[in-house]
Amino acid sequence: MSAPVKVSRVISAMTIPFTVTLVVTERDEGNFLMTSLLPKIQAELNRIERSYSAFLPTSLVCRYQMGEKDILIDPEFQSIYATVHQAYYQTDHLFDPYYKGVYDPTGYVKGWAVEKIFREILLPLFQKQTVQALCLNGGGDMQLATKDSSDFSWRIGIEHPDNVSQICARLNIKTGAVATSGYSKRGKHIQALENSNIKQVTIIGQGLGLADIYATAGLVANQEKLHYLITKHQLTGLYVTDQGMHYFEQGEIH
């Protein structure tokens, strides 16, 4: 069997780049698979943006904000609504879908979308012998997997919050999700607690939707509340403050 090679393509949606990467034993096969994959992924991302954007007046989210409560009948909308409200209580109100004063699930939707598309469109490719590993990266947050029979491992670089051209940590992961929340690219896009000195939080988990929730909640928190969150939910990852990097694994802070 040939040595595995990476085949990657980038598409845009939700104002961010999404990178699709296949690890295959035959490059031509990888290129061929991409021709059918990309239109499906683009179409689903566009559908999700039309439905859940907080900026499109015709989206389900904006219509709900304007008083169309019967939108809750929609099963997918209802599932997202229930998840972010549950997250509000699970994170002791640190993850807040009403932080802008109106319902806005943006902090969850991107991670949920990546995880959903990965599960429904990418994972079935493991039925092909030539496909060894898969990754869908949405603006730096990613869902990835490797076949049990493969020795391939994903090497993930975490950008430094003070200098995005530098890597502050490297992760080796076969299967799972990595979500990072910080201010380096989007500025102060959330309302953190007044005494917080946390610059960036990275969560490693099984699903990107939940990992994204905890990364966002961690960035809002101060160190005391973040440590409580890590211990309570047995989280794995790292966070950065002015004092340096702090690692945690399955609820244990090092």
Image: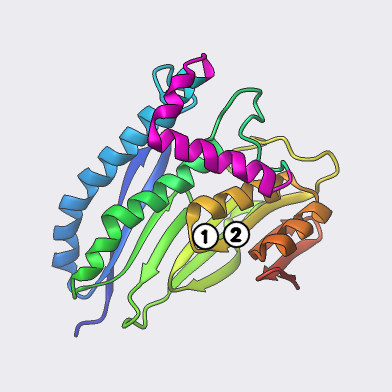
The structure residue drawn at horizontal position 62% and vertical position 52%, both measured from the top left corner, is 215
What is the CA distance from the residue labelled 1 to the residue labelled 2? 6 Å
Q: Which mark, by number, is residue 194?
A: none
The disc placed on residue 178 is 1
Residue 233 appears at what percent x and percent y? 67, 61
Q: Locate residue 19 relative to residue 203 in the image: left or right.
A: left
- Amino acid type, label 1: Val
Q: Nearer the viewer, residue 54 or 25?
A: 54
Question: Is residue 8 visible in the rendered structure shown here?
Answer: no
Of 241 and 149, the residue lying toward us? 149
Q: In this view, does 71 lie above or below 243?
A: above
State which quarter of the image contains the C terminus.
Answer: bottom right
Label the magenta part by its dominant secondary structure.
helix
Question: Residue 19: x and y, percent?
Answer: 36, 52
Give the residue at x 38% y 29%: 51
Does residue 219 belong to the magenta stretch? no
Three-letter code for the amino acid on which mark 2 is drawn? Ile
Residue 15 position (above or below residue 37): above
Left or right: 178 in relation to 56? right
Check the image and name the residue furthest to the bottom.
1
Residue farthest toward the right in the current orientation of the protein:
195
For label 2, the crowd category at 10 Å Cα-Cα, with few meaning under 14, some 14 to 19 and many 20 or more, is many
Q: Check contact, mark 1 vs mark 2: CB within 8 A.
A: yes
The mark nearer the N terminus, 1 or 2, is 1
Quarter of the image where one finds residue 119: bottom left
Residues in magenta, as a range: 65-92
Pinpoint residue 105: horizontal percent, then vertical percent: 54, 35
**Element class at badge 1:** strand
**Quadrant of the image for the N terminus?**
bottom left
Q: Position of residue 87 (x, y in %)?
A: 62, 45
Q: Which mark, residue 203?
A: 2
Question: What residue do we see at 37% from left, 78% from top?
Answer: 152
